[in-house]
Amino acid sequence: MSARTPARAVLALVGPRCSGKTSVGRALAGRSARPFVDQDAELLRFGIHSGWRVHSVGELLTRAGQARFRDLEAAVLRRVLEPGLRVVLATGGGVVEREDNRAWLARAAFSVYLEVPEELLRRRMAAQPGERPALLGTDPVAEVGELLARRAPLYRAVADLVLDCGDAAPEELAGRLAAELAL
């Protein structure tokens, strides 16, 4: 990895559920003096303000359905990216599913793909039962492989940098990113 500074204002972390986007994002924001924005938290606020009576992003996904949820997710992504603020953004795991979102990320963000081994993602998902609804069937842990196979090429396509995370702690990963990006 060579030192480089992202020219785009938003530093976006992309990757699957349980890859550590929120934890690493918070730690990186602290190291870089940039505000932290969690797209899921913004999506929940946006959903509540739009009239949905929900308590979690998972509940919003379940009640809205995937198509409407992805529309809301795209609207929130644009609201974060359009002003060109210097923030660290933890994106939603499925944000790369839509071509327009990938184009927005490419245009307005420096994106880092947090690459985590599939088995570790499965263990992390299993440790948080009920927090995340299934997207393809009835078991969110069982679908990790299929989702990863579908989305990994999209994460790579949008990424300006791929960070091999292994099982490193969020603080360690944030330190590696801060050094790599000269933040």
Image (cartoon, helix red, strand yellow):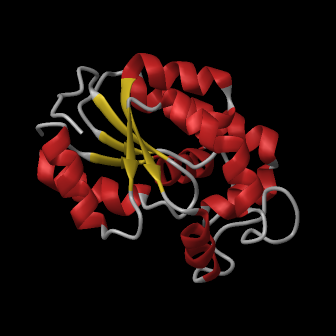
Quadrant of the image containing the N terminus: top left
Residue 53 visible to the viewer:
no
Whether 6 is drawn above or below 40: the answer is above
**As drawn, is 165 to the left or to the right of 43?**
left
Residue at x 88% of width, y 62% of height: 137
Nearer-the-camera pick, 21 or 74: 21
Residue 23, position as x, y percentages in the image:
35, 63
The residue under the point 40% across, 58% down is: 22
Q: Residue at x 41, y 32 (%)?
A: 80
Residue 166 against residue 163 in the figure, above or below: below
Tell me the quarter of the picture where residue 87 sits.
top left
Where is residue 164 shown, x and y percent of the image? Answer: 39, 53
Direction right: furthest residue: 137
> Farthest residue toward the front?
1
User: Can you give x and y, in whole percent of width and height, for residue 31 in the image?
Assistant: 13, 53
Residue nearest the viewer, comparing 119 with 9: 119
Q: Say which of 116 and 94 sits in front.
A: 116
Residue 131: quadrant of the picture: bottom right
Q: Quadrant of residue 173?
A: bottom left
Residue 52 percent location from the top left of the image: 69, 52
**Do we see residue 145 in this rendering?**
yes
Quadrant (top left/top right/bottom left/bottom right) for the C terminus: top left
Q: Is residue 170 left or right of residue 133?
A: left
Q: Is residue 23 above or below residue 147?
A: below
Count of numbered badges drawn on the protein: 0
Q: Nearer the viewer, residue 14 or 157?
A: 157
Q: Residue at x 59, y 78 (%)?
A: 123
Left or right? Give the position of 152 relative to 146.
left
